[in-house]
Amino acid sequence: MPEGIPPISFTTPSPRGYLYACASVDPPRRAPFVRRSARREQALAQWRALAQNLTELNEVAAATVYEAVLIPPIEGGPRHDVLMLVQTTSPEELAAVPVEKLQADLVMPARNIRRIGDTDATTRGTFLFNHFTAPDPEAAVPVWDELAGWYTARTGVDNSTLLRPVEEGAPYAFVNYVRLPGSAPAFLLNQVLRPSFHRFVRSTLKANGMVAMPILCRPA
């Protein structure tokens, strides 16, 4: 850990269940910025209506639809431009969510294993869904802990909800759900312009065989 970064203070993980769903409707081919699209607007309208219906279920605590605003062109990374995060009252209630209605490219039931602050304090702003792959998901968690310390100390991020899949065969070791302190471009620049991002964050990921693939979005 670089000097000057204090130990991170975790809060108790959320007792809720999480269903992360996403689709590639009309994403940019390689450009990072996501332009407006009639096809995407139609899909967002359908997903918003479904989210509203889901919140009427007793088992569902919240359902929020997001549209991507920036997708870094990472080789092999997800290109999802329509996303939804459904929160159930407990992980055991995830089975009550009618996932077949989502028509999504990915549906990942998950639970929260690490938490910093309250990502859901407001639904306004820019949000990050960061998708991590790792050869050993268990060993990757303490690595994420170290990286989270750098982000809270250097970028002003004051919240994080780390979601681990509850089913075998998920494409990601975990997905990090974060509310950002500013815009998507400002957040990315705040990383890449810092030498310690390259010396510590990127080198730590590489040393542990991990890849981080972010999608930055806003509530739709």
Image (tube, rainbow, N blue to C red):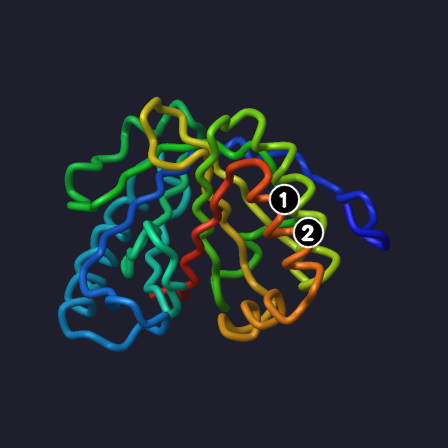
Q: Amino acid at mark 2?
A: Phe
Q: Element under label 2?
A: helix
Instruction: Say which residue appears at 57% left-offset and 68% top-offset.
Output: 187
Measured in 3D between alpha carbons, the distance from the residue under mark 2 to the one under mark 1, in whole angstroms, is: 6 Å
Pointer 2: what residue? 200
| Relative image position of residue 180 (x, y in whole percent) | 56, 63
Give x and y (percent) for residue 160.
Answer: 59, 48
Task: Classify mark 1: helix, strand or loop.
Answer: helix
Q: Do tag 2 and tag 1 residues touch (Cβ < 8 Å)?
A: yes
The residue shown at (20%, 46%) is 104
Specify whether 208 is left or right of 158: left
Quarter containing the N terminus: top right
Q: Residue at x 63, y 51 (%)?
A: 201
Q: What residue would you read off at disc 1?
A: 204
Between residue 148 and residue 218, name the one nearer to us.
148
Above or below, 83 relative to 31: above
Q: Amino acid at mark 1?
A: Thr
Q: Residues within 10 Å of mark 2 (few under 14, many from 20)?
A: some
Q: Quadrant of the C terminus?
A: bottom left
Could you tell me which residue is drawn at 38 percent across and 57 percent down?
74
Q: Position of residue 184 (x, y in %)?
A: 49, 70
